[in-house]
Structure formats: C-alpha cells, structure tokens
C-alpha cells in the first residue's frame, strides 16, 4: 500500500540504521542519506538542472531515493507540486524525513509504492513533467553492488527501462515531458524505447568526465505524442566545471 505523507504530521519518522547529514549550500537543503547504502551522486543534480520546469507544473519524481531531485526542484521552482515515488521502504523513510526537515511537506507528497501500481495511484495524464534517474545497469553487467539497497537502485532488478517508460506514458498528459539521465552506452535502447511509446526525444546532452574522454552519461528530454524533432545540445565536460 502506498504511504502518503500527511501535511499535518509534526513528528519526524524513525530511521533504524545509520545515516549521515550534509547540506547542499546552493539550495540550503539538509540531506540525510544512508551511511552504508544508496547515496545520490552528481547524476541527480545534473538532471535537476537539465529539466525545463514550467510555472505550476505537477511533477512526478520516479525513484526518488532520499528525495534529492524533488527537493532541489521544489527550491528552484516555488509554484510546482511534486509527487515523489519510492519502492524501497528504508529510502522512503529517509525521503520522508528529509521532506519534513526542509519544511517541504506542503510541496512534495511521498508515495511508497512501485510502478506496477501506478495506474491505481495516479489517474492517466496526471502530470506535466516526470523526472527520473533510473537504474541503468543490467543485472548481468559486471558485479552487483555489495549493498542490496544500492544494487536495487543502480541495477535493473526491481524495474527496468521499459517499465519506467510505460509508467511515464500512463502518467503524462499529451504534450507532457519526461527528463531523465541514463548510461551513454545504452542510448540506443533508451531512444528506441521512447519512440516506441511515443515519448518523442526532443533534447539530448552528452556528459563527459573530461575533454577527449567518451561520454559516460546522457541527459534526454522527451515529449508525449510530439512530432519528430531532436535538438542536440553542446556536450558537458564535468572536470572543467
């Protein structure tokens, strides 16, 4: 059953294992994360910066983790409403506490559930924009992360790309947009899947660790039921930032 965060709750949820606390100074956000488990990376911040959010957008963050993308977007755009979806119970509790610590419970609503139940939670066409930093490693590619929480977040175990794109197709209204970050070496799978489900790729940006090093990540924006027209943005080189 999905657990919806009530705005009237004043207590902070109990977290039964060790966490660390840090601060994103650019956004004045406190962030609790598992000390030993899935921790957000620069991927999430790159995605939050890439997403083109409009005033009063209703946003869905699929796989919110500790809630970092949802919180950054809530700080950057004061008039949006965000639904944050997370399947892993431990991460959902941390996201819930982060939302309350940063006084964002009137802007961000947390749902503890998975994509198999998305049609039960949200009516079709509920959202203007979807953001997601999905797992982009197949279970058979290299060694799984030792920590089970991190393995589930980074590898396609609980969900896969097609399920995420299918859920996006359901949740977006026509003309709604998805922004996501994915592995550059699997870009053909991503673009083919988006086109198959009529989530037409509209913007693309390659992320390189440094000059003369192949891209490792790719940022893509798609639009539901849009025409064919893709804008390729200049590459981003992380070491020069």
Image (spheres, helix red, strand yellow):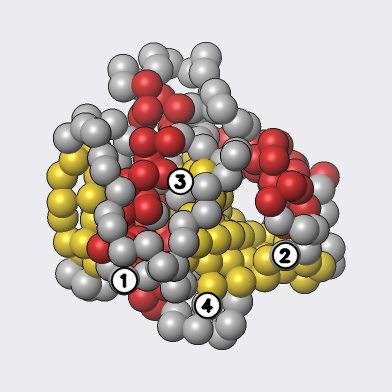
Of mark 4 and mark 3, the one earlier in the sequence is 4
Residue 159 image position (x, y, % from top left): 60, 31
The residue at which mark 2 appears reads as 126
Task: Determine whether, in the image, residue 29 is placed left or right of residue 2.
Answer: left
Between tags 1 and 4, which lies in front? 1
Residue 218 image position (x, y, % from top left): 51, 50
Q: How many marks?
A: 4
Secondary structure under the numbered disc 2 in the rendered image? loop
Residue 217 circle label = 3
Q: Quadrant of residue 178?
A: bottom right
The residue at which mark 1 appears reads as 103
Please report the residue visible at 39 percent of the width from the left and 77 percent of the height from the top. 76
Q: Are marks 1 and 3 in contact (CB under 8 Å)?
A: no
In this rendered view, identify the residue nearer to me: 25 or 211: 25
| As drawn, 8 above or below 205 | below
**In which quadrant of the rendered image does the N terminus lie?**
top right
In this rendered view, identify the residue nearer to me: 147 or 195: 147
Of mark 4 and mark 2, the one earlier in the sequence is 4
Residue 19 image position (x, y, % from top left): 18, 40
Of mark 2 and mark 3, the one earlier in the sequence is 2
């Amino acid at each position: 059953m999905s657990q919806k965060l009530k705005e009237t709750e004043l207590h902070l949820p109990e977290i039964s294992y060790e966490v660390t606390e840090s601060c994103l100074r650019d956004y004045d956000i406190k962030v609790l994360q598992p000390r030993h488990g899935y921790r957000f990376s620069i991927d999430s911040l790159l995605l939050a910066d890439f997403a083109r959010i409009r005033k009063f957008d209703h946003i869905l963050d699929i796989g919110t983790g500790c809630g970092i993308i949802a919180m950054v977007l809530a700080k950057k755009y004061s008039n949006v409403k965000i639904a944050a979806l997370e399947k892993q119970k431990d991460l959902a509790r941390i996201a819930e506490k982060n939302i309350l610590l940063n006084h964002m419970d009137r802007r961000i609503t947390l749902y503890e559930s998975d994509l198999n139940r998305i049609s039960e939670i949200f009516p079709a066409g509920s959202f203007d924009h979807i953001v997601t930093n999905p797992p982009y490693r197949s279970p058979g590619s290299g060694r799984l992360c030792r920590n089970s929480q991190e393995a589930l977040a980074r590898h396609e175990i609980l969900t896969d790309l097609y399920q995420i794109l299918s859920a996006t197709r359901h949740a977006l209204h026509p003309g709604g947009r998805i922004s996501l970050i994915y592995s550059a070496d699997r870009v053909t799978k991503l673009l083919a899947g988006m086109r198959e489900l009529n989530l037409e790729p509209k913007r693309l940006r390659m992320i390189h660790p440094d000059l003369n090093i192949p891209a490792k990540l790719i940022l893509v924006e798609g639009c539901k039921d849009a025409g064919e027209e893709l804008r390729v943005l200049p590459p981003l080189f992380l070491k020069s930032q």
